[in-house]
Image: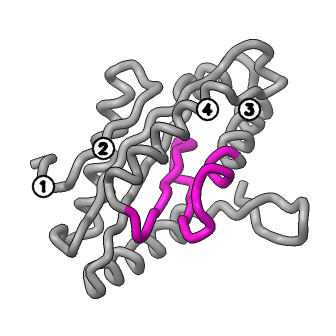
Amino acid sequence: MTRSTGPEGAMPEVLSLAQIQHLMRVEFSRAQRYGYPIVCLVVAVDQLGEVRDRLGYDVKEQVVDAVIDLLHEQTRGSDFLGRLPDDRFMIVVPHSVPDQIRVMADRLVARQRELVVPALGDQRLTLSIGGSWMVQGETLFFDDLRGTAERCLAEAGVAGGDQVRLMAPEASL
């Protein structure tokens, strides 16, 4: 389900897998050329598979919609949000450095803990976030940035979720 922007009250835009990957490559190339920082975040809702198995697909989609709203509320208009396979998200954050991203990602994790989805009752779901960055063109390939963010997300999940893991691509070797 891809949302599109529109008149007031319309759902915010979520890019498809192809769109977010293309946009990430374009922004990555610009960041390399012009020397500005860029960050790639990969976000997963912890326990989402359990929600789907226990309460069904419609409730899972309600959770996903609520998370999309949260991600849009807590990111800038110049950031890009796309939906990845397995109900994960990628956020492309141009012109941001790791310290700024740490603050944003920690805020997302904290706000998710407060998120109320009526169909879940009292159950609260958490987020895991993995991220990587490039500052001043030191990373050569977009795939290094995304791959490091994916590995950080996996580490956050193995560690129990509900946390942020960030790492520069060079540190992941």
At a point 21% along the width and 53% down the height, the residue shown is 168
Q: Amino acid at mark 1?
A: Glu
Earlier sequence position, callout 3 versus callout 4: 3
Q: Nearer the viewer, residue 50 or 166?
A: 166
Occupied quadrant, residue 158? top left
At a point 41% along the width and 77% down the height, the residue shown is 27
Q: CA distance from mark 2 to mark 1?
A: 12 Å
On the image, the x and y values in percent for residue 3 come to 75, 60
Q: Amino acid at mark 3?
A: Tyr
- For label 4, the SS is helix
- For label 3, the SS is helix
77 in the magenta segment: yes
Residue highlighted by disc 3? 57
Q: Is residue 6 left or right of residue 93?
A: right
Earlier sequence position, callout 3 versus callout 2: 3
Earlier sequence position, callout 4 versus callout 2: 4
Q: CA distance from mark 4 to mark 2?
A: 18 Å
Q: What colour scheme governs how the chains and residues are painted in the rendered image of this protein?
A: one colour
Residue highlighted by disc 4? 112
Which numbered dot is residue 170? 1
On the image, the x and y values in percent for residue 11 come to 80, 58
Q: CA distance from mark 3 to mark 4?
A: 20 Å
Q: Amino acid at mark 2?
A: Leu
Q: Is residue 120 left or right of residue 165?
A: right
Vertical position of residue 142 compared to residue 105: above or below: below
Earlier sequence position, callout 1 versus callout 4: 4
Q: Which residues are magenta?
A: 70-96
User: Residues at badges 3 and 2 in contact (C-beta under 8 Å)?
Assistant: no
Which numbered dot is residue 166? 2
Q: Is residue 4 left or right of residue 167?
A: right
